Image: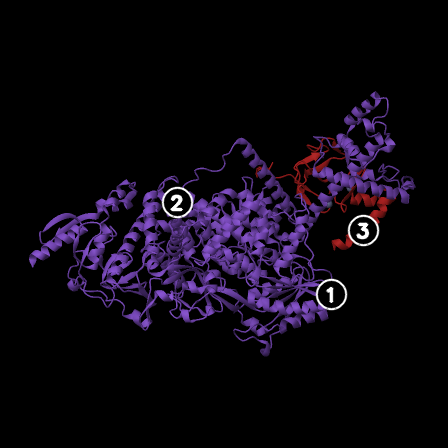
Chain colours: A purple, B red
Amino acid sequence: MDSDRRRDSRSWDWDSPQCRAQLDEVFFRRHDYIQAGSPEHREFWSFFDRFQRFKTKRDVSGSGAKEDREDGKKTGTGKVDLGLPKEYDARYRINVSVCTRDVEERLGKSEHRGRQRSSGPGSEEISDCRLALLHFLDFSQRQSFGKLAKLRREQKTLPIFQYRDRIVELVRLHPVVVVAGDTGCGKSTQVPQYLLSAGFNHIACTQPRRIACISLAKRVSFESLNQYGSKVGYQIRFETTRTPATKLLFLTEGLLLRQIQQDRTLSQYQVLIVDEVHERHLHCDFLLGVLRSLLSDHPDLRLILMSATINIKLFSDYFGGAPVLQVPGRLFPIQVIYQPIPTEEQPSRSEKLDPRPYLRILQGIDQRYPPEERGDLLLFLSGVAEISTIQEACQVYATHTRRWIVLPLHSTLSLAQQDKVFDISPPAVRKCIISTNIAETSVTIDGVRFVVDSGKVKEMSFDPKAKMQRLQEFWISRASSEQRKGRAGRTGPGVCYRLYAESDYDAFAPYPVPEIHRVALDSLILQMKSMSLGDPLSFVFIDPPPAASIQTAVTYLKQQGALDSRGELTSIGSLLAQLPVDVVIGKMLVLGSLFHLVDPVLTVAAALSVQSPFLRSSQHNPDCATARQPLQSNHGDPFTLLNTFNAWVEVKGERGGGSRKWCRRRGLEEQRLYEMVNLRRQFKELLRSHGLLESESSTPSGGDRGQRRERLKERRKLYQMKRDHEQQESSRRKVLRMDEGHDGEFSSGSDTEAAGKGKKDKGGSGQNLDIQEVKFKLRHNVSELQEAASVSQDMSSRQQALLKLLLCRGLYPQLALPDEHNSTRKDSDQVFHTRNKQGVVIHPTSVFASDPEVLQVPEDDTREIGPDRRDSSRHQLLAFVTLLETNKPYLSNCVRVPALQALLLVANSVDSNADCTRLVVDGWLELELREPEEALKVLSTALTLRSEWERLLLAQLGQSTMGGPAVQGVSRKVMEKLSEGLVRFLLYNEVTYSLRRLTAFQTQNLYIGPQSQSDLPDTKAPDVNPLFPGVEAKPDPIKGGLRVASFFNYNSLADSKDLYSECLRTFWSCPNCDLYMPLTPLERMQHEASCRPAAEQQQPEEEPEGGKAGSSSVSSLTRVYHCDVCDEDLTLTSTEILKHKRNHMYSAK
Amino acid sequence: MEQTTSLTPQKTFTCQLCDLSSPFTYYGQKPPNTRAIVLLEECFVTQDPFSPDKEKFLVLGSTCSLCSTCVCVGPDCSLFYTKRFCMQCVNKHLKQFPLQIQAELAKKKPSSKSAAS
Ligand SMILES: [Zn+2]
Ligand SMILES: [Zn+2]
């Protein structure tokens, strides 16, 4: 201060921070409207600079403001004198004043006291600053009001605006209302707002897509002037912005269904809006069905269906003739040009598309429309392969003419790549966006003037017979065709080129096939069962799926163990119904929790539920392939995914934001990994809430106070970054570079990274901020994840074997057998067979496509027995996640498992011959074991392991459904013993056998068929089944033989010998007790199942009695046996019964 | 702030010229939390919805000092020059306004017409 003393007011320096700080003391104090240090404060000073410059310029040019003509006098008409000041001053136009007299007075006093003029601002400076402040306030008022006015203007011009009152009135009067309007009419954004301002309060609006929930919530909260509040929110799988103040919630259809599942009263909502019902998604159709059945119980609930103007009557009729309000869309006129592809340019099947028809359209546009006239082109093709063919050709043309930027758009592209279609092309250059039907409804791109419609779509269909999904090319429907056309008229008049004849168009189906007719209904049926909606066959769907499709799903769910034989939910089934995942994935989770393999199983389950993080486009990039190499596991794709996730978590922990680059190097879409980590967490919470996982004992919320404070500070900072990011997100679009189309993701990607590194950005520009990283840090505890990752990274081969078994049990019956001639085929020609579909191949993205040798039986291990019989102990099967037919039927996400062991442990149906050397699994796989002795041993072990596994699983599930989350159903010790047994069985089994698929002819006479009582000499003997207490071993009524366990039929194969024929008896000594006698295979298995080594006998008693399931301990091994000879009831173990009977036999002889 | 009950209908400001309407939270010359700031007319005020800061206000409109018409502050509906005038009154008494304003309005007219049609 002292050094400044001598300055007088004339040396006042507006640029000096000290001087400005002094004015801050006057105008921007701590409690003032604008406070020093706030964003507005910064804005003020930059406004101030502009304002000063403007003032100087005006003074210099000496604008005529001063020579104001005395207009006041000329109001000769003498009506009213407005009393306006004579001289114009812009300040009079501002309706705000700022009073700072108190401060000025204080300053004034200090001025008097000091002899010299103080260094502070003089009155001139203060009034300059005040004037600037007034103008600044006025400026910001104008700005905000301008936004508001623009908003209101836009709302008014929407076609739906005129129907505002009518809509509210209809909703007041009718429980169900259908609002039909085409693209651009504004229904999705406006209808919820009309209802809100009419006083409706708890409104939910469903959307088929998550992304729409987010963007609608954002838009509507802005439009309803609540962008910084939470009146409008969204809720999707991993994210919600919902608070108690939320009145309007956008959520996905699936999520609303889950909410209904938990609370059928729907008490939390007053109004439900189901948007885009015409898209006919599976969830949406189902949701409508559920709501229809619930409505009568909730007379106050209001339901609004919103649809495009497609098939409106269907929806109205379904809800008893609900009133329909039809709103015209806002489309500019579109010229339709039919340009069928000439025959010589039509591709034959299996041939690439001919690009000529497409190029001609580009040329035509170039000739007809001057480049200054803006307007982009959107081209619809059926699939990714088609897109890359046409893209290539168009790119050549674009490079030559420099008038086009060619951009692909489909869902397997990275998000960054997808996002490019929204960027702006340089002047006189058009975007040519080549897209799948994703741009038909899901993605809306503004500025499209030309649409090219190939008329084709690839759609998933489900083949219930082969239990296979199929991706096939179809002609689109007229509705889709119109939808595609409409994309050309959103921002101005447009042109639509249809590459088919008008007669083709007329022959198209009116609407697309609803999803419910095209997909597997497993999850739907399971959910219906858990919502107790009765028989799925009689449920009133808007458009019922084929009965066969429902039947297939029911059968499948029974195979999976989710439904019992009567079609009721099992305990595992009711748990699976609550997990928002595929049944197979849900099963893995449950099994994983039982075996204390939770961490890897959570990761694998999450990985298999999201799109693959491996980008297809980088598959042929050698650098990526090299970098990916260490992540690959030849045990199977789930293991590769597991490795990838773990390695990523490792990188996250060490380098945080560096993971982006790490992913790019390996051709990984990081977004998928973020989805995985979120899903993984959700799974974990689900398991915990179902008591299948111990609640975290040592949550890392501990630490000393200092650490906690640090963490809190860090979190606050992250939240701030997230908020800042959200505010800027609506950021301006980038301008595309001319070479945008043809350089790959990698070159351009690493460029931006290198550029970004230089400047350290202060969270301001947002360009460089990795928002995903911020969200990740907010949501997850990295060190905890790292711990989990290192656990599954250091998996022993034993754990690995066990994990494989769990995956296999989860995936069963999705198994495939390598063709016997694979070893003589090329790598690319390896063929596999599933039970229902022969000749499938492995998807090129699978590890087994590049390394098929690991699936083949090692040469030195085989023994050629006959012409087509190869014995080995190393046969393997593939368990797979999906079977999808595109141009070929492909298996993807495969795991290899040891055949015999896996089948015996997971298959639903195993049949044997009399000495158990021949086994048939599920009626299609035949295993022949060489040594009867070995065969018996292996079968007997499997039976024991399975019964124990089943018992523990039920105990675990039983506990979890009844008890609180803390109860741990099965003791660790018992569990470990089972794991040990399973691992030993999987890894150390040297039994040699042959494995093949039965021919159709062989399956015809497979079983001996039902036998009359007299044929079975000694049926009474094994009347109670010691292996599965409660399940009686009785003759199988269809196949014949003896049903020993729920999955095992003894001696039912047609080549069988008599059940107890003496020749099958061999002398055998039990390793556990002193028994030594000739026994039939069945007797021996029974003995083995009940006879435990002495050391183990006590163990079962330690374990807590877990309900009924516990009753299979020692005491249950004895049972009441009625001996016909003695005519007496005896309490004996099965071995003792055998001994007893034997006594009679010998004495009889 | 957010927990407004649905029973008390929001007070709504509506411009009698352009029909713009929006809820307001305060009417007067001294909106809450404005400290040194005073309005020079009685205004319909709401919280600025475009500012993350809840304390920022936004003036929606006021009444014409001559004819008492309720008008928004939009340049097509009203003008403030020491007092609020609705556009109808401004046009009626155009001559009394300084030349700057007359020139400005003359310039704006044709463009605003075309935008409206
Ligand atoms: Zn107005
Ligand atoms: Zn007036």
Q: Is residue A464 left or right of residue A360?
A: left
- Of A812 and A335, nearer the camera is A812
Looking at the picture, how far across and down is residue A1135, in whole percent? 18, 51
Residue drawn at x 59%, y 36% is A713
Which mark, residue A692? 2
Q: Amino acid at mark 1?
A: Pro
Q: Which residue in the structure is indicated by mark 1?
A: A371
- Of A709 and A386, nearer the camera is A709
Q: Which residue in the structure is indicated by mark 3?
A: B109
Looking at the picture, how far across and down is residue A1006, in whole percent? 27, 68
Crowdedness near tag 2: few (<14), some (14–19) or many (≥20) residues, C-alpha within 10 Å: many
Crowdedness near tag 1: few (<14), some (14–19) or many (≥20) residues, C-alpha within 10 Å: some
Q: State how far apart marks 1 and 3 are (Cα).
A: 33 Å
Q: Which residue is at the far top?
A: A113
Question: Can marks 1 and 3 be said to lie on one chain?
Answer: no
Q: Amino acid at mark 2?
A: Leu
